[in-house]
Amino acid sequence: MKNGFELIDYIVFIGYALLILGVGLWMSRTKKGHQKNAEDYFLASKSLPWWAIGTSLIAANISAEQFIGMSGSGFAVGLAISSYEWMAAITLIIVGKFFLPIFIEKGIYTIPEFVEKRFSTNLKTILAVFWVGLYVFVNITSVLYLGALAMNTIMGVDMMWAIIGLSLFAAAYSIYGGLASIAWTDAIQVVFLIFGGLATTYLALNTVSEGQGLLEGLGIIYDKAPEKFSMILDDSNPEYMNLPGIGVLLGGMWVANLYYWGFNQYIIQRALAAKSLKEAQKGILLAAFLKLLIPFIVVIPGIAAYVIVNDPEMLSRLGAEGLLNIPSDGAADKAYPWLIQFLPAGLKGLAFVALTAAIVSSLASMLNSTSTIFTMDIYKQYIDKNANDRKTVAVGRITSAIALLIGAIVAPLLGGINQAFQFIQEYTGVVSPGILAIFILGLFWKKTTNKAAIWGALLSIPIAMFFKVGPKGWASGGALENVFPNLPFLDQMGYTTLITMGIIAAISWNQNKGKDDKKGFELQKETFSTSSSFTISAFAVMIVLAFLYAFFW
């Protein structure tokens, strides 16, 4: 039975760990005579260049959620799950052109701080508490759980010890150093992530093709599972409720992506730490191009695992029956870590390094953003308004440590979830429509009022739950079934956003009788002007995406 690492794999992994810790701790050092302040700790002294921003965006985004969860969805659903990645490329361009200029112009540290400038302290506090809870109990816990699942599947490490190990690794450089340590180590992490991931994809397809190469292997898995290569699912597909056909391109997927890339603290924080707006926009473009690669790193291996598992002859030829934890329809998230067991010594270590880099970089980013929001929007607002730089940074570090401890305690409770990527998207989708509605109207409609935004925030969750629970409860199978149809969750998100926007617009109009709100933003056309290189690059991304969707339709 194959399991565990050989000596060369341990050497590769230890070398990676020492490099990341060394760079992280070097960047954490405090210059002689300088007291690290909030801008240093939370925004890396606003000094990040474009390439650090772009790579850090991807490192923060790509985690076990993608490597494990999205590969699991590739196993269960196929290439259609790639829409989360490919549509994100367009979303990044929208964020870079229309959202980022306003955020940087306002000089904000956190997304809740922006809410205070546009609406009120009360709404800021509501959203700050929500985000801290979401990051700790959903994001940090899911990253720890999925990362530990990978270590358990590949090496047989006990889940609890794996959670502790990942926690200590991320804490070692991120809690003390802040965003500067995280962003600069992310540039290294992404190199491991991309090349380690591509190596896994190549070797998986080369294995399937019996040494005939990547393209031959791709052709084989396409011939054996053509249904896994449809980007747009029809309503007869068993996964239609997760990815509802053309509705993916026109509906709720936009809600998920715009919320995540535009108004998610641990993502947008990198761009807020840029040297300048143009530097931030170049970083956004780099992230958009890298996004085009991600499905080839995380989804194709899941499809390859599906083909191997469902072909007895291939399974026998590869000796795969002896491998640990064979994935199945009820345990799809084992696909990627199971596949790593095929790799030869050395490359197995590199693939595991890629996975670890994704986990640790995302975990570090989430910890830093959780501490940023708590410190700047809750602690300094309600506990100690006059906290000096030393105390502010200390509170940030303590908050990160507590968030990590809670995440490590809660993570084991997530056991038994199949297709964790879909699970995370679905339950984040309960709250993201209301937040997106508030921000879109707050940014671009001057009549939006604070009262309307608060009502929108409060009512959006019961609206979302109505769509989610209603069909499964009183409507399903009863007289109201046609009134409350059982909608795919992406469609639920789309409808929740539109209804919430309608509520906010109606209350705002009634409150101000059609007049502009006194806190509404005066936006100038020049605010959204971009360089010719940004425009050309944006069109290049869209042309590539048009080809991909046309080819895999």
Image: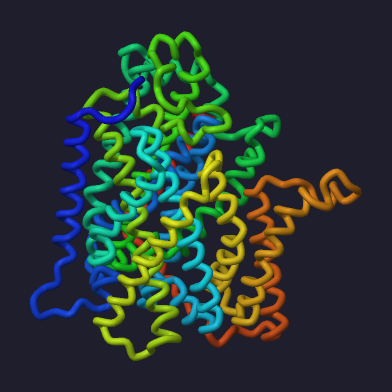
In this rendering, the count of numbered labels is 0
**Residue 338 higher or lower than 147, as above or below:** above
Along the viewing direction, whichever of 75 and 541 lies nearer the viewer: 75
Along the viewing direction, whichever of 393 and 512 lies nearer the viewer: 393
The answer to whether residue 517 is visible is yes
Residue farthest toward the left in the current orientation of the protein: 32
Which image quadrant for residue 207? top left
Question: Residue placed at 59% from the left, 62% from the top?
Answer: 431
Question: Residue placed at 40% from the left, 64% from the top?
Answer: 403
**Residue 431 higher or lower than 382, as above or below:** above
**Residue 334 higher or lower than 126, as above or below:** above
Judge from the rendering whether residue 506 lies leftward or rightward of residue 448; answer left or right.
Answer: right
Q: Where residue 272 sits in the image (x, y, percent)?
A: 34, 68
Question: Residue placed at 70% from the left, 58% from the top?
Answer: 465
The answer to whether residue 90 is visible is no
Residue farthest toward the bottom in the current orientation of the protein: 386
**Residue 161 higher or lower than 45, as above or below:** above
Judge from the rendering whether residue 47 lies leftward or rightward of residue 464; answer left or right.
Answer: left
Q: Where residue 552 sits in the image (x, y, percent)?
A: 51, 29
Colour scheme shown? rainbow
Which image quadrant for residue 393? bottom left
Q: Where residue 212 sits in the image (x, y, percent)?
A: 32, 13
* Quadrant for the C terminus in the image: top right
Question: Residue placed at 53% from the left, 50% from the top?
Answer: 424
Q: Where residue 476 sits in the image (x, y, percent)?
A: 82, 46
Along the viewing direction, whichever of 164 and 68 lies nearer the viewer: 164
* Quadrant for the N terminus in the image: top left
Judge from the rendering whether residue 33 lies leftward or rightward of residue 407; answer left or right.
Answer: left
